């Protein structure tokens, strides 16, 4: 657009200059023809007829009047008059040609200067548009929509169409930000509110299971209620973690991802899955230790839960391109490439299963990505070499 505006400014200037130069040329030519025409600067007139010498023969013609030049040459006055008229015409043509040539050069020079000023003015005029574009790009490139929606253009300037566009864009971001904040607060508040009845249910079920004289059916029913209640509590904890991890991490401490992985592996029951590889290279980061431990725990639990009998998993940490990298690979059912993003969506499982819950609620990898993005990183998945997945988390290192 800047180039187009510059071409438009320069083209209009050249057009106006060409029209002005043409009009000037026509006016000057008309003025010269009107004032001078075929006149000469020197009017040669014969004031008296030449005298015929006495005794001349019949038919004698007197010689034409002559003029003596500075170098002594004699030239007929008629030839002098014709030469002067010819010189006048040549001077008039040279004047008009000089007007066109010099005017064209001046027009070209001033046109180049005008195009340069047009380029600068176009940049100044488009500066608010660049500001709007930069803000939109930051919003689109934000790790999560909630953090990106806090951006504002806040354009300062005259009340014109661009200012109105920027203010409208800010109003839209404000409404979206409030909507996302309200949604997140609702999830957090609902999760907190659900904890109380779940705690009461757990206490009543434990009391019924441990009460003296309770029948076997009552104890079995209480154990079933406790099992269901425990799953609901894990669901509530997952929702709370997901809601909290969507926010930007404000309090960070230095820590090492490899140490977190060591701690998580030491306290996790692999349920018969073999840890085939453990390449833990120091990967220092700055972040929330609770959230990063939950991220690692979810990765390991997901690799164990979605594995095949007798399968294996591998864990690796390290640093690449300034990022701390954590990669977990497992065996399992083959995953189609078009389903890779599905595993990061809340309550989504491979194959679109939303009912079956023996393998979890579908929040594990959603929390992993949310925590990674809250730390300025990201999480991606790729098909494993023998089925299953390779989930890689990248977080800016220190």
Image (cartoon, rainbow, N blue to C red):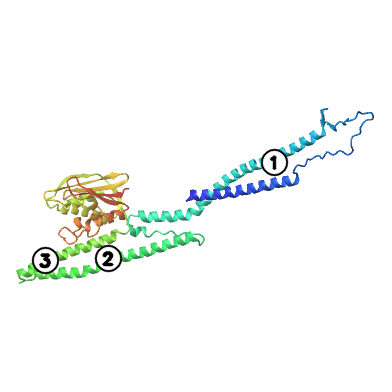
Question: 76 or 291: which is nearer to us?
Answer: 76
Kindly give the residue lying farthest to the right in the view shown: 54
Q: Earlier in the sequence, mark 3 or mark 1?
A: 1
Asked if 265 appears above or below 49 in the picture, the reply is: below
Kindly give the residue lying farthest to the bottom in the view shown: 213
Give residue 252's position: percent from left, percent from top.
32, 54
Residue at screen point 59% across, 43% down: 108
Which one is closest to the eye, mark 3 or mark 1? Answer: 1
Mark 2 surroundings within 10 Å by alpha-carbon count, few (fewer than 14), some (14 through 19), many (20 or more): some
Question: 128 or 185: which is nearer to us?
Answer: 128
Quarter holding residue 142: bottom left
State the CA–CA distance, disc 3 to disc 1: 110 Å
State the CA–CA distance, disc 1 to disc 2: 87 Å
Question: 124 or 161: which is nearer to us?
Answer: 161
Residue at screen point 94% across, 28% down: 55
Give residue 353's position: percent from left, percent from top.
18, 59
Q: Earlier in the sequence, mark 1 or mark 2?
A: 1
Give residue 80's position: percent from left, percent from top.
79, 34
Residue topped by disc 1: 95
Residue at screen point 38% across, 54% down: 138
- Disc 3 and disc 1 in contact, CB within 8 angstroms: no
SS class of the residue under badge 3? helix
SS class of the residue under badge 2? helix
Q: Which mark is residue 187?
A: 2
- Is residue 108 shown to the viewer in this render? yes
- Disc 2 and disc 3 in contact, CB within 8 angstroms: no
Residue at screen point 40% across, 56% down: 136
- Is residue 258 shown to the viewer in this render? no
State the CA–CA distance, disc 2 to disc 3: 27 Å
Quarter holding residue 104: top right
Give residue 16's position: percent from left, percent from top.
59, 50
Residue topped by disc 3: 224
């Amino acid at each position: 657009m800047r180039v187009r505006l510059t071409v438009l400014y320069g083209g209009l200037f050249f057009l106006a200059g060409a029209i002005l130069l043409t009009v000037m040329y026509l006016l000057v030519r008309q003025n010269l023809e009107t004032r001078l025409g075929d006149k000469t600067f020197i009017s040669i007139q014969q004031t008296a007829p030449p005298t015929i010498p006495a005794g001349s023969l019949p038919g004698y013609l007197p010689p034409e009047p002559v003029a003596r030049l500075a170098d002594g040459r004699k030239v007929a006055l008629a030839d002098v008059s014709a030469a002067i008229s010819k010189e006048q015409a040549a001077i008039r043509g040279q004047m008009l040609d000089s007007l066109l040539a010099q005017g064209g050069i001046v027009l070209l020079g001033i046109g180049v200067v005008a195009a340069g000023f047009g380029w600068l003015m176009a940049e100044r005029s488009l500066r608010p548009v660049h500001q709007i574009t930069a803000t939109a790009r930051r919003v689109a490139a934000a790790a999560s929509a909630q953090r990106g929606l806090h951006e504002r253009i806040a354009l300062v300037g005259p009340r014109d169409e661009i200012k109105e566009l920027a203010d409208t864009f800010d109003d839209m971001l404000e409404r979206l930000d409030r909507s996302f904040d309200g949604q997140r607060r609702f999830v957090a508040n609902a999760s907190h509110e659900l904890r109380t009845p779940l705690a009461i249910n757990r206490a009543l079920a434990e009391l019924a299971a441990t009460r003296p004289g309770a029948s076997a059916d009552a104890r079995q029913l209480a154990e079933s209620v406790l099992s269901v209640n425990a799953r609901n509590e894990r669901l509530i904890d997952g929702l709370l973690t997901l809601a909290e991890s969507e926010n930007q991490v404000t309090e960070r401490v230095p820590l090492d991802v490899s140490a977190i992985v060591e701690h998580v592996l030491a306290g996790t029951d692999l349920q018969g899955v073999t840890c085939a590889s453990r390449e833990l290279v120091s990967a220092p980061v700055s972040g929330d230790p609770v959230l990063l431990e939950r991220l690692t725990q979810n990765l390991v639990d997901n690799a164990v839960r979605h594995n095949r009998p007798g399968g294996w998993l591998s864990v690796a940490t390290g640093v690449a391109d300034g990022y701390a990298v954590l990669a977990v690979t497992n065996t399992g059912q083959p995953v189609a490439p078009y389903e890779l993003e599905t595993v990061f969506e809340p309550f989504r499982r491979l194959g679109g299963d939303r009912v079956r819950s023996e393998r979890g609620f579908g929040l594990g990898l959603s929390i992993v990505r949310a925590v990674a993005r809250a730390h300025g990183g990201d999480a991606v998945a790729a098909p494993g070499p023998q089925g299953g997945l390779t989930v890689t988390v990248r977080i800016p290192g220190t």
